Image (tube, rainbow, N blue to C red):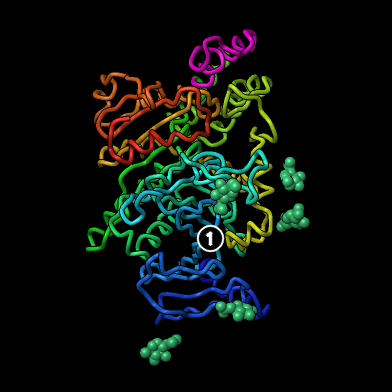
Amino acid sequence: MLALLALLFGLLQSVSSNVQHTFSLNPNSSLWTYNSSREVFKARNPSPSYLSSVTSEHYFTSLLHPAFPSYQIRVKKSAFCDPTVNVYTGYLDVDYGAKHLFFYFFESRRNPAKDDVMMWINGGPGCSSSMGLLMELGPCSIDMDNVSANGTVWNPYSWNAEANIFFLDQPIGVGFSYADFGETIETTEHAAQNVHAFISIFFETFPQFTGRALHLSGESYGGRYLPAFASYIYDQNQILKATGKEPLNLQSVLIGNGITDISTLYPGRYEIECGLAALEVPFQKISTCVRMKMALSRCQDAMTKHCVDSFDSMNCRAAVSFCDSEMSTGYWASGRNVYDISKMCEGDDLCYKENTVIKHFLDQPATRELLGVQSPNNFSACNREVGTNFNLHMDKWAVPSQHYVAGLLERGIRMLIYAGTYDWQCNWVANKLWVDKLDWLARDAYNAAEWRDWVVNGRKAGETKKAGMLTFATIRGAGHMMKAQAMVSRWLAQREL
Ligand SMILES: *[C@@H]1O[C@H](CO)[C@@H](O)[C@H](O)[C@H]1NC(C)=O
Ligand SMILES: *[C@@H]1O[C@H](CO)[C@@H](O)[C@H](O)[C@H]1NC(C)=O
Ligand SMILES: *[C@@H]1O[C@H](CO)[C@@H](O)[C@H](O)[C@H]1NC(C)=O
Ligand SMILES: *[C@@H]1O[C@H](CO)[C@@H](O)[C@H](O)[C@H]1NC(C)=O
Ligand SMILES: *[C@@H]1O[C@H](CO)[C@@H](O)[C@H](O)[C@H]1NC(C)=O
């Protein structure tokens, strides 16, 4: 109903204002061109829709799919970021064009026709995946030293070394994704539907991806998003199979420094600050640690009672607010970077000075042109409104995401839970604790498994443990945001870390 209203409203708008988004859906054609001057939107040659048939850097090619009548993908080539591969950017238009999800797609540097496909998302909720792209694992990094004429420098450790990868700005409102009429997405489970549609349309529209292995990766709030997204995809796959259609070949989920089971977050933070979990000598003041230790048991009791054993929105919020204030204030007062205890917090409350440079870069008209950005909004690393809306629904606290993880593991989806040991926010101890107590079929085998070092170039990179489909890994001396390409390479090859 809402979608229909939006559509009608959209048609009226485009008629009355006589410009922008003149939709003329031609049922005879699956390939459309969209003139980036926003004035022409006309049919072009129909299929086959190989991605390589998208050749223009100036115009979007629009692709429709009969199974998803209310969606279309608009895609164009882009000279952004990685000159060694084909790069595409564009939008998934949802609800007859009322909502637009922005994506970047980079072909694999190895063998794009054969390599797996990976999706990366950042957390927040509300943060743009371009942060992961330009600060961590993308094909290029933001130029912090003013050495590059194009604003970025090539990243030899990018995750597209051996996989095709797309970065999705989701949910609506994040990064360059936007809605025409103010629609919002306010829960992870709702967001899952758009992400599933995006991936399905992408895989169905471009036949070269049919049956290709798919991996979902992300960090931070991705620990909440990804188990729900992957589960939604898995469940939808069963419906597709039952009707004789090609399912998505979902293989694995990778979660870096995630927030998944809320019950271990605060004990983890105590260990990072006041224990020896991260540094050889705790950095936090003794007096602060005493206060935290006293608060911890009360915090845990209240959360167990109001958020975990039963869920009461008002009392759970009060518990979280007590925990946050008692267990987090001391850390912020230390002035350290919440995502990397070895650094100081610089810039805004995201603590990295890269943020302002990235925003400046992405707001340049030339960059927006290069990417084909049509959002009316300026870029922001994290959209506060999205964060607030998720928070209003207690999205982080209301659903125990670890049960999705167990469900996926038990159905043969590989899961990699990894964490840099210097992160405070979604720290490795909290992750180890929830993985240890995860209620799933191979729990005993996992607990009995040996820890071992994993090594890159003869050097210890961290510690790891594995049972069944589950692998846990730490990355020594890494913060919340990291590169870890060696880890991903082994994971994609289905080798032990
Ligand atoms: C679609 O194809 C049919 C049959 O070829 C034709 O009669 C009709 O005019 C076409 N519609 C459009 C919108 O081009
Ligand atoms: C795009 O629209 C502009 C303005 O109407 C027009 O000059 C240009 O020729 C169009 N390009 C294509 C490829 O249709
Ligand atoms: C941008 O410039 C840097 C440094 O000069 C170079 O490494 C990189 O390949 C360039 N990127 C693009 C997309 O041309
Ligand atoms: C970067 O270099 C350009 C030209 O060399 C200069 O105009 C600009 O001020 C520099 N910016 C910074 C932040 O150093
Ligand atoms: C985007 O930023 C520019 C320059 O800072 C400003 O003039 C403009 O009003 C901003 N637009 C929006 C939609 O916030």
Residue at 56% in and 16% down: 273
Residue at 35% in and 72% down: 48
Q: Which quadrant of the figure has residue 416?
A: top left
Nearest the eye: 269 or 190: 269
Q: Which residue is mark 1?
A: 78
- Residue segment shown in magenta: 268-293
Left or right: 449 as drawn, with respect to 29: left
Under mark 1, the amino acid is: Ser
Provide the secondary structure element on which disc 1 rests.
loop
Left or right: 84 as drawn, with respect to 333: left
Asked if the residue at label 1 sits under 8 Å from ligand 3, the reply is no
Looking at the rendered structure, the number of numbered marks drawn on it comes to 1
Where is residue 485? Give x, y as percent. 42, 36
Q: Answer whether residue 360 is visible to the viewer in this image.
A: yes
Where is residue 244? Give x, y as percent. 22, 63
Residue at 41% in and 59% down: 197
Nearest the eye: 325 or 328: 328
Image quarter hosting the C terminus: top left
Q: Which quadrant of the figure has residue 127?
A: top right
